[in-house]
């Protein structure tokens, strides 16, 4: 049986995929009120590893528990929760790691996560306190009024007490191989984002999704994120897929943490990169057309604004990381910097040159610079 014809459980919540290295189960769970996630069970040394853990919210835990029952009742009668030996996190966003503590306790599994995000898993409350101060500064500089800052931060929901901290986490760095699992460091969507190769599939987390484009953040908010790391990781994933195909004569399939499997990674990468270009062009056009320099809030309102408090932070972050890249490349500049004070910290942007082609060429050069010398033969 081919992976492209998964066996789907009676309720549709569990899919069984046949990969070249063994059977993988995908369990769908409502991880956040507005978001469905995919958690995977992967065979490992006679037992199982679980990739991601849901959010730890009651609905997420209940969906996952039901998924485990379906795996056992409809597919593999030998499956038990206590046969999950490791919980491996693609990254430490709440919809992926919030359930790690609960499922680690119930299964006896240890938790693996990239080193850059292990503190989020074990010391979430402390991270939330510190990061929120950084985000507050970002929002004030973006032009958000101080009385609106807390509402936007509350909508985002990165707050102490939000998740139960895990006791310990084993640190990964990318580049490791454990049995049939191989780890790749692909930052951009988060600072410690991992992709995990297993036979002819790669668990690609949130880096590349089938329908929507993943969220990215300015590096000033979270190190190792930002537009350039994201572009670089997309290119790296594309190369991994290309080398896999030339070596094994078949396509590498990506199983992402949301939405549907990706059967053509290079094509989807191309769509994501083109969309990046389009958004950058739109941003520079808006600034070129504006008679006055614009704050990030004003720019975001002109780019897209859907007005939902929990999405405002995402929209500002998305535009913020593009502004950050264009500023870094000299395509944008900050106007009236002499007026900035601690009390009036709003940054306003204008373009440095009116030709958007120059901006795109510069980005291409920087990506080329990143990729020069990249050894793609060792997948
Ligand atoms: Zn994520
Ligand atoms: Zn996610």
Image (cartoon, rainbow, N blue to C red):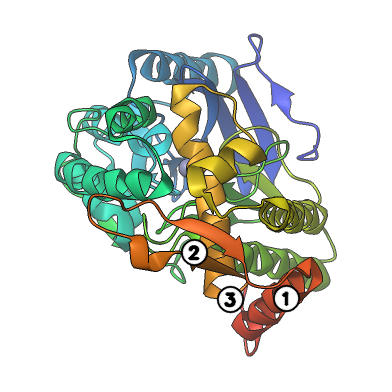
Find out if the beta carbon at label 2 lies less than 8 Å from the nearest ligand 1 atom.
no
Query: Could you tell whether 287 is left or right of 51 in the image?
Result: right
Single out the mark in the foreground, 3 or 1. Answer: 3
Residue 180 visible:
no
Q: Residues within 10 Å of mark 1 (few under 14, many from 20)?
A: few
- Residue 145 x, y percent position in the rendering: 34, 35
Single out the mark in the foreground, 1 or 2. Answer: 2
- Residue 372 x, y percent position in the rendering: 65, 88
Q: Is residue 26 above or below residue 202?
A: above
Q: Are marks 3 and 1 in contact (CB under 8 Å)?
A: no
Q: Is residue 118 above or below residue 315?
A: below
Q: Secondary structure at mark 3?
A: loop
For residue 335, which numbered disc appears in the image?
A: 2
Query: Could you tell whether 360 is left or right of 175 in the image?
Result: right
- Which residue: 50% across, 29% down? 311
- Which residue: 58% across, 76% down? 330
Q: Earlier in the sequence, mark 2 or mark 3?
A: 3
Estimate the spatial distance between the alpha carbons at disc 3 and disc 1, rounded to whole Å: 14 Å
Estimate the spatial distance between the alpha carbons at disc 1 and disc 2, rounded to whole Å: 26 Å
Q: Earlier in the sequence, mark 1 or mark 2?
A: 2
Q: Is residue 364 above or below residue 95?
A: below
Residue, far bottom: 373
Q: Earlier in the sequence, mark 3 or mark 1?
A: 3
Looking at the image, which is closer to me, 157 or 56?
157
- Residue 224 x, y percent position in the rendering: 42, 64
The N terminus lies in which quarter of the figure?
top right
- Which residue: 44% across, 23% down? 309
Which residue is identified by label 1?
Answer: 364
Looking at the image, which is closer to me, 138 or 272?
138
Which residue is identified by label 3?
Answer: 330
Q: Secondary structure at mark 2?
A: strand
């Amino acid at each position: 049986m081919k992976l492209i014809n998964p066996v789907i459980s009676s309720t549709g919540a569990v899919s069984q995929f046949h990969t070249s290295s063994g059977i993988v189960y995908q369990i769908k769970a409502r991880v956040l009120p507005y978001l469905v996630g995919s958690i995977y069970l992967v065979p490992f040394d006679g037992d199982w590893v679980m990739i991601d853990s849901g959010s730890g919210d009651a609905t997420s835990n209940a969906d996952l528990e039901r998924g485990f029952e379906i795996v056992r009742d409809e597919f593999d009668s030998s499956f038990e929760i206590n046969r999950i030996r490791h919980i491996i996190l693609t990254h430490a966003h709440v919809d992926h790691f919030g359930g790690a503590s609960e499922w680690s306790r119930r299964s006896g599994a240890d938790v693996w996560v990239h080193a850059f995000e292990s503190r989020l898993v074990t010391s979430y409350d402390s991270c939330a306190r510190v990061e929120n101060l950084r985000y507050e500064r970002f929002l004030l500089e973006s032009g958000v009024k101080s009385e609106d800052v807390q509402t936007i931060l509350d909508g985002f929901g990165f707050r102490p007490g939000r998740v139960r901290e895990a006791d310990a986490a084993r640190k990964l760095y990318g580049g490791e191989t454990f049995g049939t699992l191989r780890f790749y460091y692909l930052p951009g969507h988060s600072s410690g984002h991992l992709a995990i190769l297993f036979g002819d599939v790669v668990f690609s987390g949130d880096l590349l999704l089938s329908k929507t484009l993943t969220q990215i953040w300015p590096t000033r908010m979270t190190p190792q994120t930002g537009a350039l790391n994201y572009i670089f990781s997309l290119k790296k994933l594309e190369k991994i897929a290309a080398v896999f195909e030339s070596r094994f004569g078949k396509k590498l399939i990506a199983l992402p943490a949301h939405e549907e499997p990706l059967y053509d990674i290079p094509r989807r990468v191309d769509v994501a990169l083109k969309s990046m270009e389009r958004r950058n062009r739109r941003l520079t056009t808006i600034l070129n057309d504006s008679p006055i320099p614009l704050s990030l809030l004003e720019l975001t309102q002109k780019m897209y604004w859907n007005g939902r408090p929990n999405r405002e932070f995402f929209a500002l972050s998305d535009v913020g990381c593009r502004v950050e890249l264009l500023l870094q490349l000299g395509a944008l500049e900050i106007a009236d910097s002499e007026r900035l004070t601690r009390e009036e910290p709003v940054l306003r942007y204008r373009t440095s040159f009116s030709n958007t082609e120059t901006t795109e060429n510069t980005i291409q050069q920087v990506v080329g610079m990143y990729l020069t010398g990249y050894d793609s033969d060792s997948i």
